[in-house]
Amino acid sequence: MTNANTTLPPERLLELKDVNVQFELREGTVRAVNGVSYHVNRGEVLGIVGESGSGKSVTVRSIMRLLPKNTSRDDGSILFQPEAGKQIQLDGLPSKSRKIRELRGDAIGMIFQEPMTALSPVHTIGTQIMRTILLHRNCSKKEARERAIELLRKVQLPRPEQLVDNYPHQLSGGMRQRAMIALALSCDPVLLIADEPTTALDVTTEAQILDLLRELQAETGMSIIFITHNFGVVADIADRVAVMYLGQVVETGTVDDIFYNPQHPYTRALLQSVPRLGQAPVHRLKTIPGMVPDPFNVPKGCSFNPRCEFAVQGTCNVEVPPLVRFSDDQQARCHFAGKLPEEVA
Amino acid sequence: MTLEATAASGEPEVKGREEDLYTAKPWTLIWWRFRKHKLAVASLVFMIILAITAIFADFISPYTPFSFNRLNTFAPPSIVRIIHDGELQRPFIYAVKRKRDPETARVLYEEDRKKVLPIEFFVKGQPYKFLGLVETETHLFGVNDRKQEINLLGTDSLGRDLFTRLLYGARVTLSAGLIGVAFSFVLGLALGSIAGYYGGWWDSGIQRLMEFIRSVPTIPLWMGLAAALPVAWDPLFVYVLITIILSLIGWTHLARVVRGRFLSLRTEDYVLASRLCGASEYRIVTKHMLPAMTSYIIAAMTLAVPEMILGETALSFLGLGLRPPVVSWGVLLQDAQNLRSISLAPWLLSPGIAVVLVVLAFNFLGDGLRDAADPYGH
Amino acid sequence: MLGFIVRRTLWAIPTLAFVSFISFVIIQLPPGDFVTAYVAQLRNGGEYVTDIEEAMMRAQYGLNDPLLVQYWRWISAIIFHGDFGRSLEWNAPVSDLIWDRLALTLIISTLSMVFTWIIAIPVGVYSATRQYSFFDYIFTVFGFLGKGIPDFLLALILMWVAFIWMNLDVGGLISPQFEGKPWDSAKIINMLSHIWIPLVVLATGGAAGLIRVMRANMLDELRKPYVETAYAQGFSERTVVWRYPVRVALNPFISTVGWALPALFSGDVITAVVLNLPTTGPLLLQALKMQDMYLAGSFILILSVFTVIGTLVSDILLAWSDPRIRYS
């Protein structure tokens, strides 16, 4: 299964092939990530959309090798190419290994969902940023502090010289998330993983944080994996999108492909449940029938089949659908991809 | 705009056991969750057995707690055997012979391997009033002999049967713990709910008081209060006062739990909803808030019992709590206070082991209940 | 921060007045008073005291005055002259009896507390980071046993074990032959051979509880997102654990340092009684039993004062260690 010998094309920053993650819980085995493949190119923003429990966060944690202790299966290939020609195999690295620790916080930065609790409550913002800089960069404490102030300025926090000595609880939610971004950027990462960074924020703050991320991305040329459950946010920031359902990527494509020409019934259903301008006035938005199946017994065949309005008994609930490729970038995992009836706009 | 809301809005499809899970009443859920906690279930069984034994102590024990026997002082525990001369028999003990060590003049007991005393059930013995009501002479078990005794845990310096005294002591010690908890429950519930419900000035005042009581070392405080009780008072009255003293200090823990639950429940939407519906304060507290914290309170009370028991034991051990002729585990342990008696008669420590077992059982039980208290949590 | 300290210190003053009054009430609580007890003592000694003489003595000591007046006399003597009154039983000023025992109590308590911390914190951290491992189970069992076994029982058992198997007579702090002799190396060695039992007893009892608290705190903290953030910065496990969650989990401990102050002063009374240690605890017990009320009341007063100061110290330490409280 591993393709350690594959050489990534130079524009490729990260490539996941057939990644699987399982957890052992008291109630049984959870197949959290079930053969996920996607890639990130240099300077690109990849949006990952999915409901909670679809495995989007677990997948990025397997990139960071930050899987919980009860992980029972963790395989597939994860290749990372921080600079052209220098390829690192991340899969199989133990969480504690020196190799991955050197990448974390340095080449790969990560932002988390809860800015309220993701920063240590008993250390100042400055201390937390400085520790990361001192860990990865060979510099004096004074230089690290200056760099920390510089970073806080970069994320557009007011009075960075003062804020550097403040504790997280003295900052508002939006400011904390900015500080979190500054922490993630402290060593100029080539890849920034943002795990629902705006979910806990109100809408205006969310827009500001998205603006900031876009600016920073344009300025530094880093790549971003942006995880969200909000299609609006994806449209706002991403270049390409991967839609996940029950531990699988069901469709990938450029933002335009996904929004204007969705091929997977799940993507379609999701989009229909979101109000859009120019839509014919309807009384109710469509909902997806049924509930997300519990992760202990994923349906046979296509995992979406019990809730799919196009499902055909005998096919969809028996065979696992293949990945159908449409264009260079768009792929969908459905028996009837490309053959679905036209959307009624 | 979010997916979570749209996706979850379908009809739930649940079947079989899962359906039970959705429709089960809270107490059923608590019981299911508690059942998973093996140690807690074992502790519950142990406590129930102990409670029954204590209630029927007079019937189960072979003797009465005050019947002394000058010829049977410091007798070691009788060993229950089933094999005599290589043959299987009904459970029996050997008779013992009392001797004196010629050098040290200490009394020694030696088993007489020839004389078999079978253990019999429903034997006639010393008269007592069953549950304080019916005069009877029947004991659950014993040996049929005029001179020999069965002492499962040996005897003390006056030749009193320690097993009997341990069972009678269980009555006093356990009930002191329970009554103490009941008192502290009243105090804790009242003050805790005032602090949690009204908040503000009341809350900070009660909080400070609780902090202070908690930070005073308990034993000296207990000692101070207990020493204020006159020596000459009726032992039963002293017993009640001691439990009150224990609860005067023990209520803080309960009050803290109640206060914390009140604080978190006060902001719950359903409480706000009932207020909007025009429910009276009294109704909100009794019908909506108290039921939501019953399981927590029960767990906290269970965890408070061992502290009371340890307190009673410690005070009585020091001679400040219950005094003879009242029999409690602490009083029994007074006999085991010095090295000489322990090395002479190690079985005098057995009330201590009983204390340890009961304290552990209550702790396990409380831990299990606390884990099960919130059946909707994870 | 300064404002906080000043505010809290000011709060402590009415509290101190209150607890001193309570201590005095406790002194007064038992039926009879100082003179009753004193006269009873004299009569037991064979002296003849008339009721009139008794009443005169009562007037002389001002025992007929209202409670508040008596309280003021008692507390002003303590504040302005350091005079705690006389111990009836010892027939000596209370202050002469207390201070040398206090020093010894402080030594034993402090040592045992240090031992407790040295054992409990690393073990608690280990148990939490290696949850459900073999040693975690061992420590959990140890913790439960430590919680269930009363200190005095542990002391008794250790004493018995030391006596039976090691043939050591471990009661008291020094062997009788050294009593009243000047401190030399032999006496110190002799004391060290005695002091380990109280230390083991006190540290075991304390550590068992602390391990459980530390483990629970650590388990709570390890689940918090900031720990994952720290891992995502590339720190090693040891750095992450000791720099972040341990630092937060220690807060409640730091705050209890102050609360340990009254406990340090009183020592563990029961252990001290069982082991026959010349600390403050047994003296207090004796005073309470004999209704030697000035001695007992002074103890309770000093204990309460230590408690108030300890709470103050705790609050300040907590504010210092946890910025969330400092700025709220």
Image (tube, coloured by chain):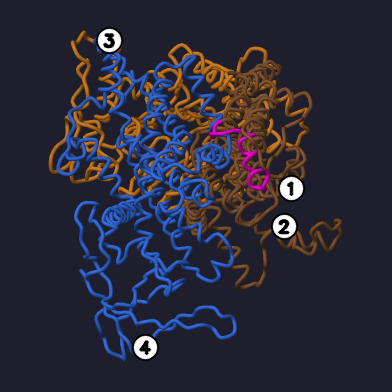
Which residue in the protein does label 2 denote?
Answer: C173
Find the distance from the CA under tag 3 to the CA under tag 1: 63 Å
- Note the chain letter of the orange one: A
| Residue type indicated by callout 2 | Leu
Which is more toward the observer, B123 or A88?
B123
Is disc 4 in contact with disc 1, using a CB cutoff of under 8 Å?
no
Residue in the foreground of this view, choosing between A329 and B66: B66
Q: Nearer the viewer, mark 3 or mark 2?
A: 2
Left or right position of A126 against B256:
right
Say whether disc 3 or disc 4 marks the residue closer to the N-terminus.
4
Task: Kindly identify which residue carries mark 3.
Answer: B276
Check the image and report above or below for C110 versus B211: below
Q: Are marks 4 and 2 in contact (CB under 8 Å)?
A: no
Chain under numbered label 2:
C
The answer for how far apart the CA atoms under marks 3 and 2 are is 68 Å
Q: CA distance from mark 4 to mark 2?
A: 46 Å
Residue matched to label 1: C104
Does residue B59 appear left or right of residue A68 in this picture? left
Q: Is residue C303 above or below residue C15?
A: below
The reply to whether discs 3 and 1 touch (Cβ–Cβ < 8 Å) is no
Q: Is any atom of residue A325 visible in this view?
A: no
